[in-house]
Image (cartoon, rainbow, N blue to C red):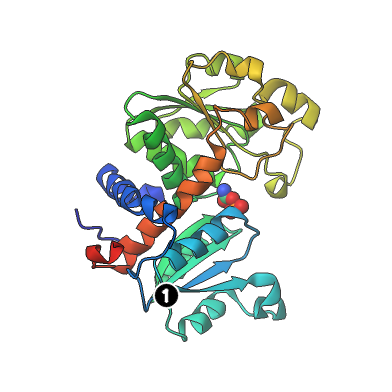
Amino acid sequence: MAFKHKHLLGIQDLTASEITTILDTAESFYEISTREVKKVPTLRGKTIINLFFEPSTRTRSSFELAAKRLSADIVNFNSNASSTSKGETFKDTILNLEAMNPDAIIIRHPCAGATHYAATFSRSNIINAGDGAHEHPTQALLDAFTIRQQKKNFKDLKIIIVGDILHSRVARSNIFLLGKMGARVTLVGPPPLLPREFEKFGVNLDFNLDRAIEGADIVMMLRIQLERQAKNFFPSIREYRNIYALTAKRFRRAKKNAIIMHPGPINRGVELSADIADSAKSVILKQVENGIAVRMAVFYLLLGGKDREAFD
Ligand code: CP
């Protein structure tokens, strides 16, 4: 199936069949990262800019490695060391970078909608690497890739997403994706971080983790995003941990073959205990590994790498 989008701004814009195309393409790229020479010429001559206005460990390095493994040139832009600190606007920054003729620009920005705005005037393919509390589409795609790798398909899987739902772009992208793929999603968290409006996305809400985790196939934990919280949403980290942290005891209520996911960065001892984070049931580092194949697939589908034979 052809992939007809110019940009990847959010999971909301994709059909189930387009999501499957991305995951299938990622599967064909996965093996490249296991080779001794981890590079194919598929996107030779293409130029990509990594434009991050927020910190990142996984996403930025993963996009960079994905571009390099496809032989594209990639430039990393650090907003702290750029002319934005001298007052240059977001739009002028992009227009100036575009004057250098890149093919794609990856953007992470603290404002929801920043990447949609960029797409209204940019000539390049825009890829959303996280816009405020709105969407983080490649995170949801790598999560889906990991779930498919572990569970084969999505139909009727019971997936709980636990934590700071209100501020989580990862939760939003996953809600859209998992719903389109036929999974049953329950969102769990303290009432102030679990808005009732989310029910309109076809998910269940539960304030009680001990109840929601019963029989779950996937337990996806989220970080408390203190940097996006202008006020206190719960009395203390200690109380939050007592009620919503994933511990070995709590996890025993899930299915025997359940897995633990987390987009990172993890806060050990806050949303999950260290033994759970490092347990054999955790696929957290697998998610990070899979991010490269998924981002290679996104580059390939958006930038029109045509030579399938170039994989070899
Ligand atoms: N999952 C994720 O977006 O991590 P980073 O903030 O480190 O990129």
Give the residue type that dot 1 points to.
Phe
Residue 84 seen:
yes
Binning the other alpha carbons within 10 Å of mark 1 as few (below 14), some (14 to 19) or many (20 upward) gives few
Report the residue at 31% width, 27% height from top. 155
Instruction: Report which residue position mark 1 lands on.
Output: 121
| Count of labels in the image | 1
Q: At which x and y percent is residue 62?
A: 52, 57
Report the residue at 32% width, 35% height from top. 181
Quadrant position of residue 260: top right
**Between 16 and 247, which is closer to the camera in this rendering?**
247
Q: Secondary structure at mark 1?
A: helix
Query: In what quadrant of the picture does the C terminus appear?
Result: bottom left
Report the residue at 54% width, 27% height from top. 281
Quadrant position of residue 245: top right
Report the residue at 52% width, 35% height from top. 283
Name of the residue lying farthest toward the bottom: 99
Image: 161 above or below 312:
above
**Between 292 and 60, which is closer to the camera in this rendering?**
292
Image: 7 above or below 284:
below
Q: At which x and y percent is residue 38?
A: 43, 61
